[in-house]
Amino acid sequence: MFYDLHMHSCLSPCAEDAMTPNNICNMAFIKGLDLIAVTDHNSTKNLPAVDKVASSLGLKLLYGCELETSEEVHVLGLFNTLEKSQKFQEWIDSKMPDVPNDEEYFGYQWIMNEKDEKIGDEKRLLLVSLNATLEETTDAVHAYGGRVILAHVLDRANSVTHQLGFIPMDLPYDGLEVKSDEQRLRVIATNPWVTEDSTNWFIDSDAHYLTDINEPDHFLRDSVFKKLWGDEL
Amino acid sequence: MTIKELIEQTGWKLSTPSLSTDIEIKGAYCGDLLSWVMGNGEPQQAWITVQVHANVIAVALLREFSCIIVADDANVTEEFAAKAAAEELVVLESSMPVYETAKKLVELGI
């Protein structure tokens, strides 16, 4: 399956307003992707709309979010059902500091329906770190039936290697996300306990703009998908 | 100045009481981005941080810091203290913010 498991909708303040459920799903569909995940910052609230649009197109969807831990490390939590992701929202809410969003400065946080109509705003700023450590966040995603991918692990901001120096040896993550094959080799070279086969590797776009969504360049084998998320999609 | 003398002067809590504090401190380094600290810390410095992830211990050992000073009442867990003690790395806790903690070291001539 050609995939892109990291992109932001118009619910993320830093994403362009054109990242609506229909635009995202149709762009992914036109590009020839088979599987996507929408992963807004600390929120799953646009997933009900994305779910409806994706299923109307026959596009496979994982139900995601990009969580920011107390160490300011970004991790993807990816669930195989909408229900699990919506239940997980309760955990997010329990760990979210109550800082109001300043739309002028950070951008809009729109919640939409499947017709791309705005049905609400997230009032709390989503660009915050949750009151949960990397370990606690990983455990929580697992407890709610999801999988954990450490996001953009070599980025100069909010990556596990930037915040914490290197990839923790005993953290039970399910995958590592890099931007290229060259980055994957660099991760392996600089973290000797990480090997080609010790984890699952993902190359995602982290798209905040429609045009940045992956081209069908990166392939996920069915066996890897089933190992992580089972048959339930 | 040794860690022992620093504790006597400041009253900061020693989170690793099983370890010797007769260790010389030469300068200090402040930072919470571990990648940055890995690249810039110097041996024998005291490292002031609010980061308490287990990777902090590995970075401190790598840079051969004399001790870690966890500032601003950041939550030092028992697990963190036990791991540091097992690695023979002294951990102190200061309830002052990072800036005030660093100022205190300056006052004491570190």
Image (cartoon, rainbow, N blue to C red):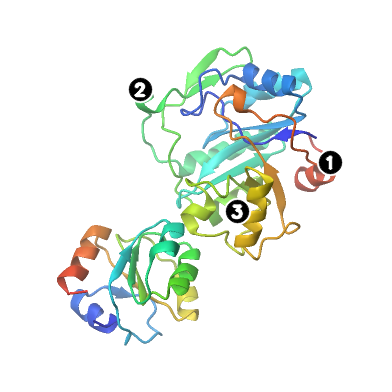
Label 2 to label 1: alpha-carbon separation: 43 Å
Please identify the quarter of the rendering in which residue A207 is found: top right
- Label 3 residue SS: helix
- Where A1 falls versus A158 (above or below)? above
Residue shown at 19%/64% (left/top)? B103
Three-letter residue code for mark 2: Glu
- Residue drawn where x is 41% and y is 59% of the image: B51
Name the residue nearer the viewer: B37 or A8. Answer: B37
Kindly identify the residue that appears in the image at 50 percent across and 70 percent down.
Answer: B58
Residue position for label 3 = A139
Asked if one can make out residue A145 in the rendered structure from this viewpoint, the answer is: no
Q: Secondary structure at mark 1?
A: helix
Q: Is residue A165 left or right of residue A65?
A: left
Closest to the observer, B43 or A13: B43
Labels 2 and 3 positioned on one and the same chain: yes
Q: Is residue A188 above or below residue A178?
A: below
Alpha carbon of mark 2 to alpha carbon of mark 3: how far?
A: 35 Å
| Among numbered discs 2 and 3, the one appearing first in the sequence | 2
Mark 2 residue element:
helix
Image-based side of B67 in relation to A175, left or right: left
Give whichever of discs 3 and 1 has the lower sequence position. 3
**Is the residue at mark 2 from the same chain as the one at mark 1?**
yes
